[in-house]
Amino acid sequence: MTRRLCARFDECRAAQRAALVTFVTAGDPDHATSLALVKALPEAGADVIELGMPFTDPMADGPAIQASGLRALKKGETLDRTLALVREFRKQDRATPIILMGYYNPIFIHGVGRFLDEAKAAGVDGLIVVDLPPEEDDELCLPALKAGLAFIRLATPTTDDKRLPKVLGNTAGFVYYVSITGITGAATPDFGAVAAAVSRIKRHTRLPVAVGFGVKTPEHAAEVAKAADAVVIGSSLVEAVRTSLDAQGNATPGTVGAVTSLVRNLAKGVASVRKAA
């Protein structure tokens, strides 16, 4: 786990609460607004920021995040610009962990070595690359770990005890438990099943367990926080971006506020659950 990630989870543990992990897509609805939004997230209550790298074929993402990626690509967002966004964010915030989340193709095209060097220099703390299984760890996971970046793996309801050690083998930072089968934002989790799954994963690892996919409201966040070390919110935030746009799909003066207002409410939901230190 990188220093920033470790410190942030330690802070949340000391405060006896789960962490709030927020996902937004880099460059959505445009680069400048996206940067302003990311800069505003920590004050609104985000403990960790997942920054989506827009891609034309986001197979694990539901309609809301797919649409956010297309909006960003239409406005000219690239991997280079996403890394520049992180560099700008780091000028004002040296403490909030940033995780880049996306797919391998843009990284491969960019060049793995070049990408890792630039991500580390920009202030990225970790990666979630959803289409690289453990069998492909030589491609990016092991080089990322060597470069000092956490490689965060996803576990799902179908990851059984036989498969789980393979999934966790080179995982660092935290484990991301996908609370539903299918795409992001598609359904509401079964919170009892989530608690059982988190407990099972914790028998295999000492890493924090974050839970996402389908968590939409402060009430959902509070339910997940009872079991998980972190609650991940994504689709509802990118939907807040979408519904704030004007008829032409451009940002309005209310775009950043629409998202940060939701984050504040979600943070209250997470903080309402007291956990053992």
Image (cartoon, rainbow, N blue to C red):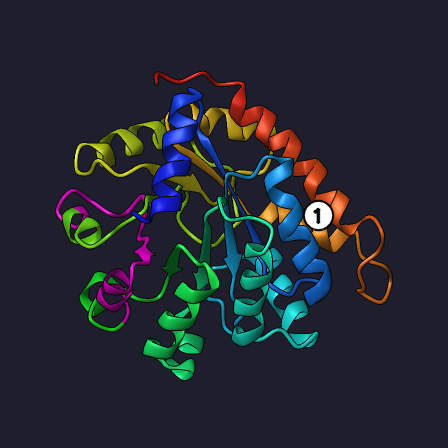
| Kind of residue at badge 1 | Ala
Given residues 138 and 192, the one toward you in this image is: 138
Whether residue 64 sits left or right of residue 194 in the image: it is right
- The residue nearer to you, when weighing 264 against 193, is 264
Residue 165: x and y in percent read 15, 48
Q: Is residue 88 above or below residue 16?
A: below
Q: Which residue is mark 1?
A: 240
Q: Position of residue 204 (x, y in %)?
A: 17, 38
Question: Quick check: 114 above or below 17?
Answer: below
| Residue 157 within the magenta-colored segment of the rendering | yes
83 versus 181 height, above or below = below
Q: Is residue 52 left or right of residue 38?
A: left
Q: Is residue 12 magenta-colored?
A: no
Instruction: Classify 79 as above or below 219.
Output: below
- Magenta stretch? 140-164
Residue nearest the viewer, comparing 46 with 128: 46
Give percent across and percent down for residue 189: 46, 36
Residue at 33 percent of width and 37 percent of height: 209
